[in-house]
Image (spheres, rainbow, N blue to C red):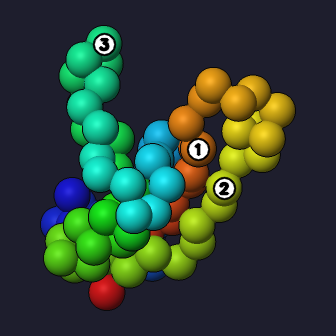
């Protein structure tokens, strides 16, 4: 992805996250791991990206059953 990203281009990722300090959870229905924001930051930095924006959805405040939703905006380091 870094090879095809234009100069000053951004990557936007929406992700469900567990709370920081929690272990990742595997979602068998969707077949993916749900990580914490801290873990996502670590993966992004190890992949050569920096996070320029981290938005947290307010939907969790309305519907308690939902996992926290975060939107990460990444740029190449």
Residue placed furthest toward the top: 29
Which of pointers 1 and 2 lies earlier in the amino acid sequence? 2
Is disc 3 surrounded by few (<14), some (14 to 19) or many (20+) residues within 10 Å? few
Which of pointers 3 and 1 lies earlier in the amino acid sequence? 3
Which numbered circle lies on residue 56? 2
Label 1 residue SS: loop
Distance in Å between CA atoms under marks 1 and 2: 7 Å
Is residue 44 visible in this depiction of the protein?
no
**Residue 24 percent across, percent down from the top left:** 28, 47
Residue placed furthest toward the right: 62
Distance in Å between CA atoms under marks 2 and 3: 23 Å
Total number of numbered discs in the rendering? 3
Residue appearing at x 39%, y 64% in the figure: 21
Is disc 1 surrounded by few (<14), some (14 to 19) or many (20+) residues within 10 Å? many
Distance in Å between CA atoms under marks 3 and 1: 18 Å
Is disc 2 surrounded by few (<14), some (14 to 19) or many (20+) residues within 10 Å? some
Q: Is residue 49 above or below residue 26?
A: below
The quarter of the picture where residue 49 lies is: bottom left
Residue appearing at x 56%, y 53% in the figure: 71
Q: Which residue is mark 1?
A: 68
């Amino acid at each position: 992805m870094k090879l095809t990203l234009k100069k000053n281009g951004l990557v936007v990722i929406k992700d469900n996250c567990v709370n920081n300090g929690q272990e990742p959870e595997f979602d068998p229905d969707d077949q993916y791991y749900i990580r914490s924001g801290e873990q996502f930051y670590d993966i992004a930095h190890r992949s050569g990206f920096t996070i320029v924006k981290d938005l947290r959805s307010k939907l969790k405040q309305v519907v308690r059953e939902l996992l926290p939703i975060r939107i990460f905006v990444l740029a190449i380091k």
